[in-house]
Image (cartoon, helix red, strand yellow):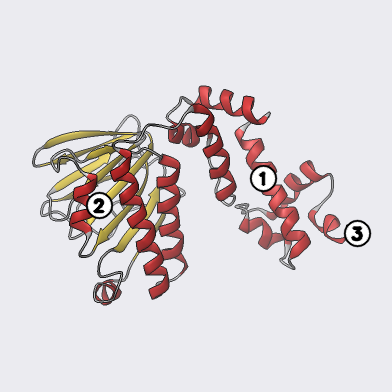
Amino acid sequence: MDRHHGAMPRMRGFAGERISVLARPLLREALGLPLTSRLLVTDCGYFPDAADHRRSRTEGSPQAIVIVCVDGAGWCRLPSGRSEVAAGQALVIPPGVPHSYGAAADDPWTIWWLHVGGEDVAELVGATLADPERPVVPVGDVYQAVALIDDVLTRMERDDSVRSRQAAAGAAWHLLALLAAGQTGAPASRNEAIQQAEQYLRDHLGARTSVAELAALARLSPSHFAALFRRATGTGVLQYQTRLRMSRARELLDTTALAVAEIARTLGYADPFYFSRQFRSVHGTSPTAYRVQRKG
């Protein structure tokens, strides 16, 4: 799944991608330690709008591969045949199974993915796949699945300490259990989907999330999702996210000594001047002027 393994690697990444790979000497060490000997995340990532993405492994992967599709579509071919992968579905490939997979040419997928190894992988994958020859399963709660992979990725991006590896393993275990349960779980109602979208935005203040991505997670068309969201919140998705970010910015200005540029970066703004303009549009004053105001 990662760009370091398998055939046909891309010479460039995908705009906005995130990826983390555990150094192979650490992999061998981790598989000999408690907890991570049972389940270990070796690679993980996020590929948005991954046009031309394709991987092929004629002898399979040493680890199980889990790919959650949140938008667009893709495909997978195993010795048993070809399967299509749609938004709201997960592709689960057991270790050692020859395979190839990729993004649909006309509607490339956006995916969150990870590779897992360890003693318990076979049992966990077996619980997830009712039929090993049918590797595509529904995701009962796509928001939670994405949040779990994001947690894995964030921890692995932070450092490669034993503690981070253990925490990532815990989130991956939760994900596989969620996928196993998702085959019998019912999709969330529309009201629940909007509430989940609101919580997702609160939990991902530093990431620019599109209407299309949230709609795909809710399994609704973008136009229908946008209408339901506006009806529930009184505003559009992007405006809602901006308000959440500016509320958090105000909190950081009040409670920390972080520079304005650092607060901007924390909230996903590469340009501190644009961040300041957004802050002024919401709060009526600049971040610097707000910070020196008397309050309380």
Could one spot residue 141 in this view of the protein? Answer: yes
Q: Give the amino acid at mark 3.
A: Arg
Real-space CA distance between mark 2 and mark 1, rounded to the nearest whole angstrom: 34 Å
94 left or right of 182 in image: left
2 or 3: tag closer to the N-terminus: 2
Instruction: Work out whether residue 176 or residue 48 is closer to the camera in this orientation and state it.
Output: 176
User: Could you tell me how far apart the alpha carbons at marks 2 and 3 are, in whole angstroms?
Assistant: 54 Å
Q: Secondary structure at mark 1?
A: helix
Mark 2 is on which residue type? Ile
- N-terminal-most mark, 1 or 3: 1
Residue density around tag 1, few if under 14, some if 14–19, many if 20 or more, within 10 Å: some
The residue that mark 2 highlights is 65
Residue with the mark numbered 1 = 244
Q: For marks 1 and 3, give the CA distance.
A: 23 Å
Percent position of residue 159, x then y? 44, 71
- Please, is residue 112 above or below residue 258 in the view? above
Q: Quadrant of residue 289?
A: bottom right
Instruction: Classify mark 2: helix, strand or loop.
Output: strand
Q: Are marks 2 and 3 in contact (CB under 8 Å)?
A: no
Residue shown at 67%/45% (left/top)? 244
Q: Amino acid at mark 1?
A: Leu
Relative to 143, 60 lies left or right:
left
Q: Would you name the residue on which mark 3 appears? A: 294
Mark 3 Cα-neighbour bin, 10 Å: few <14, some 14–19, many ≥20: few
**Could you tell me which quadrant the C terminus lies in?**
bottom right
In this view, the residue in front, 231 or 59, is 231
Q: Residue at x 10, y 55 (%)?
A: 59
| Horizontal arrangement in the rendering, residue 172 relative to residue 257 (left or right) | left
Above or below 77: residue 27: below
Q: From the top left corner, tell me how far across and down residue 7 is, in percent.
A: 19, 53
Locate residue 131 relative to residue 295 in the image: left or right: left
